Image (cartoon, rainbow, N blue to C red):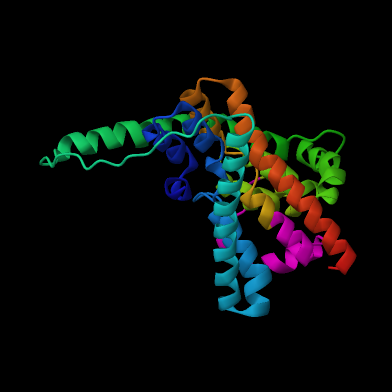
């Protein structure tokens, strides 16, 4: 879980230290339930826009801590559920032995860390992210019937988005953000502004006013926050899970677990928000 806070793909590769294949698989399937570095920009932006302005920085800090604790609780809960159902088996014992002390070989450590944990992960990211960037540009710039393909997609997904307390633009942003979670908010703003390129949030003023003009409420913000925390892993993580598990089936399960959890929570919060008039 700690490694996944930085990068979920690295968290998946870190599961190699678990001897039990069953428990290693359970850890990989739930590795994306804690927010990675790519999710933090969206989480921080939403908390700042909708919570800090109303309750101050202390409320914002408490909200971010709550998001982290919710991710940890979901990881432990889903792991318990998986090991009691589809991954049912006898728990293995855990013994931590202190190895004999040896003088570290700095060169070997650096090379192995660079090759095993950095170069391979970055190569997988580039292999998927580069063509995906081209796809996003085409969707935003090719028109069909005087409307961009991106606008057609957002309209198609709007009904499902409304059910989850979101809208079609937000769902489309998450889908197009599959190569990298960092681009979810820029894609969302690009679709709202009908621009043909990604938007730099550092150069955009009045983001909160823009979202409110698009019909965002507190319920929308909370549902988007939850779906940011719980949705399918990014492309690099999916590829890493497939490489580590050598199974398309378990890769699809790793996609389904956080997505179903996030969608279910969003529907529940949206229904509660409607009852309370939020």
Left/right of residue 185 with respect to residue 112 in the rendered view = right
Asked if residue 260 shows in the view, the reply is yes
Which quadrant of the rendered structure holds the C terminus?
Answer: bottom right
Q: Position of residue 91 (x, y in %)?
A: 48, 34
Left or right, 251 with reference to 267: left
Magenta stretch?
197-224
Whether 95 is drawn above or below 251: the answer is below
Q: Is residue 265 left or right of residue 66?
A: right
What residue is rendered at 30% in x and 42% in y? 96
The residue positioned 54% from the left and 65% from the top of the image is 65
Residue 189: x %, y % from top left:
69, 54
The quadrant in which residue 86 appears is top right
| Image position, residue 34 (x, y; %) | 54, 49
In the shown orientation, is residue 127 left or right of residue 161? Answer: left
State the residue in front, 142 or 114.
114
x then y, percent, for residue 18: 40, 34
* Count of labels in the image: 0
- Closer to the camera, 242 or 42? 242
Q: Residue at x 14, y 41 (%)?
A: 104
Q: Is residue 114 above or below residue 225?
A: above
Identify the residue at image location x=89%, y=64%. 275
184 in the magenta segment: no
In terms of depth relative to the viewer, which is nearer, 190 or 162? 162
Is 217 magenta? The answer is: yes
Q: Main secondary structure of the magenta part?
A: helix
- Regarding residue 129, the answer to whether it shows in the image is no
């Amino acid at each position: 879980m700690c490694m996944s806070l930085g990068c979920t793909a690295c968290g998946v590769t870190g599961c190699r230290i678990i001897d039990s294949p069953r428990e290693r698989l359970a850890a990989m399937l739930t590795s994306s339930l804690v927010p990675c570095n790519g999710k933090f920009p969206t989480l921080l932006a939403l908390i700042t826009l909708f919570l800090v302005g109303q309750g101050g920085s202390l409320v914002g800090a408490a909200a971010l801590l709550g998001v982290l604790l919710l991710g940890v609780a979901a990881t432990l809960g889903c792991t318990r559920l998986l090991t009691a159902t589809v991954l049912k088996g006898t728990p293995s014992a855990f013994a931590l032995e202190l190895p004999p002390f040896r003088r570290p070989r700095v060169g070997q450590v650096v090379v192995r860390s660079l090759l095993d944990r950095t170069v391979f992960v970055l190569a997988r990211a580039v292999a998927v992210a580069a063509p995906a960037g081209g796809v996003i540009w085409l969707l935003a710039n090719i028109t069909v019937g005087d409307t961009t393909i991106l606008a057609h997609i957002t309209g198609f997904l709007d009904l499902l988005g409304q059910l989850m307390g979101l809208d079609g633009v937000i769902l489309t942003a998450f889908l197009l953000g599959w190569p990298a979670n960092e681009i979810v908010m820029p894609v969302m703003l690009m679709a709202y502004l009908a621009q043909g390129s990604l938007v730099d949030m550092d150069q955009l003023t009045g983001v909160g006013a823009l979202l409110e003009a698009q019909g965002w409420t507190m319920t929308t913000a909370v549902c988007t926050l939850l779906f940011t925390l719980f949705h399918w892993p990014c492309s690099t993580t999916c590829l890493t899970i497939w490489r580590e598990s050598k199974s398309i089936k378990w890769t699809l399960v790793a996609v389904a677990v956080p997505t179903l959890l996030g969608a279910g929570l969003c529907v529940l919060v949206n229904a509660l928000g409607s009852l309370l008039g939020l």
